[in-house]
Amino acid sequence: MRRMAVVDFHPSHAEAFRSLNEAWITRLFALEARDREVLGDPVGHILAPGGQIFIALDEGEPAGCCALMAMADGGFELCKMAVDEGSQGKGLAKALIGACVAWARARGARRLYLESNSRLAPALGLYRASGFTDIPPERRPVSPYSRADVWMELRL
């Protein structure tokens, strides 16, 4: 049986956080300015403003990640979700979302928000199975990502 765990981000995870995200983004899209900012300084862009990063370990090695960025309305944006191709299908993404939901609820957040892309069908299926629903066009904010064409939220 494989050992899997979801742990809080430690500065030693910064390279894994960056490389896991860069791998899927560059495979399907192009790295954008906001990606470079956040992935280059996750402590400054995510943790310091009140967010959180979780790392999924598979046999003790970082194999997935997900972040929560604090939002002005008291909610959190679920972002920078990635699971290494070799570790997909093992429940790591589901465990990461569960950790994010529990963490946000414990802090009194009323919602989680995310932006995604319609090409990411497995991820969208997981988000919907986790309770996320599509945001109607009139409530969608402007995204810093040109690849964003799906906006979802989970009311907590």
Image: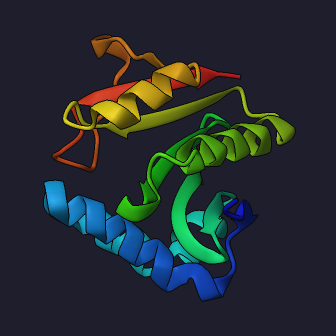
Camera-nearest residue between 130 and 58: 58
The residue sitting at 51% across, 24% down in the picture is 153
Please tell me which residue is depicted at 24% across the width and 60% down the height of the picture.
Answer: 25
Q: Position of residue 93 (x, y in %)?
A: 54, 46
**Viewport quadrant of the N terminus:** bottom right
**Residue, x 45% and y 58% (percent of image)?**
83
Up the image or down, 36 lies above or below 105; here it is: below
What's the residue at 62%, 88% (across, down)?
A: 12
- Classify 137 as above or below 147: above
Horizontally, residue 57 falls left or right of residue 117, namely: right
Report if residue 90 is visible in the image: yes
Left or right relative to 94: residue 136: left
Q: Where is residue 116 in the image (x, y as percent from the top left)?
A: 32, 38
Q: Which of 68 and 48 is in front in this view?
A: 68
Tell which residue pokes out farthest to the right in this image.
106
Q: Which of 109 and 73 is in front in this view?
A: 109
Q: Is 47 left or right of 119, judged from the image as shown?
A: right
Here the colouring is rainbow
Number of numbered discs: 0
The quarter of the picture where residue 31 lies is bottom left
Examine the image and state in which quarter residue 124 appears. top left
Image spot of residue 113 (x, y percent):
51, 33
Which quadrant would the C terminus be assigned to in this image? top right
Residue 97, above or below 61: above
Please indicate whether residue 36 sits to the left or right of residue 44 in the image: left
Residue furthest to the bottom: 12
Q: How far from the left and from the top, in percent, is residue 24?
A: 28, 60
User: Image height check: is 138 above or below 10?
Assistant: above
Q: Is residue 70 visible to us here?
A: no
